[in-house]
Amino acid sequence: MRILRHVTVPAGLALVLALAAAGCGRAEEHGAGAVLPDPVGRWAVESLTTGGRTLHAPAAARLDLGEKEAKGNYGCNGFTASVSFAGTSAVTVTPGATTTMACADMEFETAFAKLFTGRLTIDRGPDRLTLKTADGSTIAMTSEPVVPDAPLTAVEWTVQSLVSGGSVSSLPAGAAGTARFTIAADLSVSGTLGCNRFSAQVTRDGDKLTFGPLTTTRMACDGPAGEVEAKLTELFASGPLLTRIEGRLLTLTAADGDGLIAEAASVVE
């Protein structure tokens, strides 16, 4: 017969055990029941503070922190990085690949890239995360839901910008909103090039789309809409286009760097 005996644990040891149990996992209680977030996860970037200035983030700016890798968007260009955590107090960032488009808000892009490197201390609050550099600059983020990536198909895409030579330019006055297209589930595409309506069939190979021959109406087009139409017709005929979706923005890029940026307008019923 086994006899169970009551064992008295010294007060000091009990405290150590209690603290160890409370420290399991990286999300911790703080204050009156508040839970501090695990840095690993998806974060929406709100602002940067550097050089005595605060720069507010574009809607697309975000950071996905994994255990060893990170990826995100500077606001226009995408990026990757390797990360190494020191518990929940610091992370060391080694930048990886990035796209290299010239974007409308290059000041924010450049500042974000400069700050998100090296050893960064981590300041956590409920639903918030702040990364701090050695000189006190900060990247402020929130765990509020990031705009989800739109699906490629069954969405009407409205062309907002054209990419040429690595620079991005908005559509000229008089052409805004004139170029739109929808890719159906069977990869048939239809829309308007800016003036004439068109249809085509596309093939998909991983993250690349190749447009087949365009069938178009035959109106004579001039002015800004005609210029946009000519550029889009050339782009769609140029061969495989690299496809990237960030939030509600779709980027199609040809091998020579030319491309377009379109915004998801609405889900097609």
Image: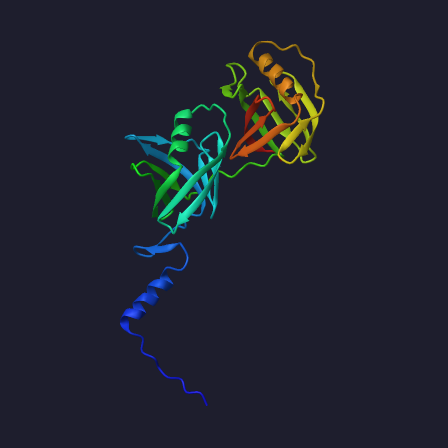
On screen, residue 125 above or below 22: above
Q: Position of residue 74 (x, y in %)?
A: 44, 32
Residue 267 in sight = yes
Viewer-side residue, 95 vs 112? 95
The location of residue 61, given as percent across then percent down, is 44, 34
Q: How many labels were placed on the picture?
A: 0
Q: Is residue 222 above or below residue 213?
A: above
Colour option used: rainbow
Relative placement, left or right, of 221 versus 174 is right
Rendering coords of residue 7 (x, y %): 34, 80
> Is 125 placed left or right of 224 in the picture?
left
Q: Foreground residue, 11 or 252?
A: 11
Question: What residue do we see at 34% from left, 67% from top?
Answer: 17
The C terminus sits in image quarter: top right
Say whether residue 206 is left or right of residue 113. right
Q: Which residue is drawn at 72% across and 22% down?
A: 213
Q: Quadrant of residue 129?
A: top left
* Residue 57 in sight: no
Residue 25, quarter of picture = bottom left
Instruction: Report x, y in % for residue 3.
Output: 41, 87
* Residue at 33%, 63% in the rendered image: 19
Q: In the image, what residue occupies the spot 48% across and 30% down?
A: 77
